[in-house]
Amino acid sequence: MSIQSVATRPFSGQKPGTSGLRKKVSVFRQPHYLENFVQSIFDTVPELRGGTLVLGGDGRYYNRVAVQTILRMAAANGVAQVLVGQGGLLSTPAVSCVIRTRGATGGIVLSASHNPGGPDEDFGIKYNVSNGGPAPEKITEAIHARTEAIEVYRTVDAAELDLDTLGSTELAGMSVEVIDPVADYAALMEKLFDFGAIRALFASGFRMRFDAMNAITGPYAHEILEGRLGAPAGTVVRGTPLEDFGGAHPDPNLVHAHDLVELMMGAGAPDFGAASDGDGDRNMILGRGFYVTPSDSLAVLAANATLIPAYAGGLKGVARSMPTSMAVDRVAAALGLNCYETPTGWKFFGNLLDAGCITFCGEESFGTGSDHVREKDGLWAVLAWLNVLAVRREPLADIVRAHWASYGRNVYTRHDYEGIDSAVADELMADLRASLQSLPGCVLDGLSVTSADDFTYTDPVDGSVSRKQGVRVAFSDDSRIVYRLSGTGTQGATLRVYIERHEADADKHGLDPQQALAALIVLADRIAGITSRTGRPAPDVIT
Ligand code: VG1
Ligand code: CO
């Protein structure tokens, strides 16, 4: 079969954001658009020639088309072997797992994560490196630079491959193995957690609901929770991946997983509730009548890690993204562990995990994970909680309240203003940055500013520096406000405002965070002029 070289011209804006290149399907469908980006990956990562590539996605609209295109291009670019998930499916943590267990050169994840899917919605593509994690900035920058100069891409003229039958086949001299998307991942989970204890928990009458949000975790959750752990059939809902996620927004938070939230807050709620996002790397955790913030989830899991077999020897250290609440810092201090603060995005945890500096890490954006893979992992977090619950046999809410009683509560909220005008958002951030020098020492609404800066991260392992990672303003009472613009959206700009205050007084731990943080919320608007600049009286999403 002959290799074709197709002449092409660069598209502007093929710049990976916080997690890969995400655009509307209509953008990806332009002739040569996907091909240009994929060829730029092959041009930037020469080891893929003769190497093994893992390929799969969250099953959203355009997933199957993209898988076929990438397979043909991989063959033309000399890839020796592709491991592709059956049906073109693989969750993001499963890609990471398969890259590691099979010793692959890298992987391509097709997903726009929690963004809606469908012909008029979003698609995305991300390259992961040989440790299983998202490519670091120097590689994503090189891929982007390549997209700006590309003149030709390579492909072969071949019929579509059958992606639905397990087993090995061949495409223009390249071996293609269609793998069970769940098997390697489920085997890894079984090694980490005490499945016997969790099985006994379910056998004792413990009830949960897992909302797969019509997205990728359905098959994983059916197999692991109902199949291997004996949770009753029906525990997993919306468990079949749909190309448009049933028209829903596959984002496991209080707004988009409302049915689950309503169930867990209502009479007769089960003991435990959880949800995961489009590509399976996010998690939301709920107890009966109780919501656990992702920041608290990381802190509580860190404090209870030794109850889980894989972490029984203790943690090497922990890390959180900068806007994530500082709850885990307090656990680290109590346990004598190093705690690292990284920019937003899982790629920044990779070096710390590889170097053995940390075992657990997390983000406020419903991301939690460990050194078992190099992506955040939604089902891992659910199983970690189940393992802790199986050992402690206490209601989830009691465990978190007891945690607050010993460490204090880092009361936390994130306010998102979505789809605002990009020019307005850029100006808001620029003015905020310009005001930073004058803020320290100011007393605002009775709160004195102790520091104000734009977060710069120096990677302790390779020394690489990432600047302009978010504006943070800290106050003398241990409270802080963080502002940054989203790097995953596909329309206009999204402003994220993160607000946090440490509350030592246990009598106040039961307050609604929106009330407990009311003064800071007003101040956050005043410092940045959000309402006056955007015309938005309130955020679109509060988590
Ligand atoms: C968001 C989150 C960030 C997360 C990223 C990818 O990025 O804030 O914490 O790592 O999404 O998650 P941003 O730039 O929009 O704030 V996922 O599940 O979309 O891969
Ligand atoms: Co995701």
Image: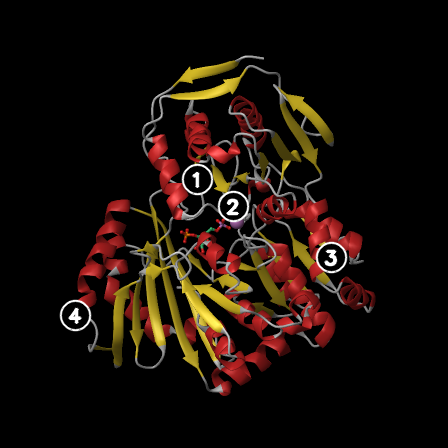
Q: Amino acid at mark 3?
A: Glu
Q: Name the residue tied to disc 1.
A: 22
Q: Nearer the viewer, mark 2 or mark 3?
A: 3
Residue visible at 47% across and 37% down in the picture: 121
Tell me whether circle 2 and circle 1 mark residues in contact (CB < 8 Å): yes
Question: Is there any visible trace of residue 291 in the rendered image?
Answer: yes
Residue 276, given in percent of the width and then of the height, sits at 59, 53
**The disc label shown at residue 113, or none:** 2
Question: Is there any visible trace of residue 233 in the rendered image?
Answer: no
> In the structure shown, which secondary structural element does the residue marked by tag 3 occupy?
helix
**Label 2 lies in ligand 1 vicinity (Cβ under 8 Å):** yes
What distance separates the C-alpha of mark 1 from that of mark 3?
A: 33 Å
What distance separates the C-alpha of mark 2 from that of mark 1?
A: 9 Å
Dot 4 surroundings within 10 Å: few (below 14), some, or many (20 or more)? few
**The disc label shown at residue 190, or none:** 3
Mark closest to the chain's N terminus, 1 or 4: 1
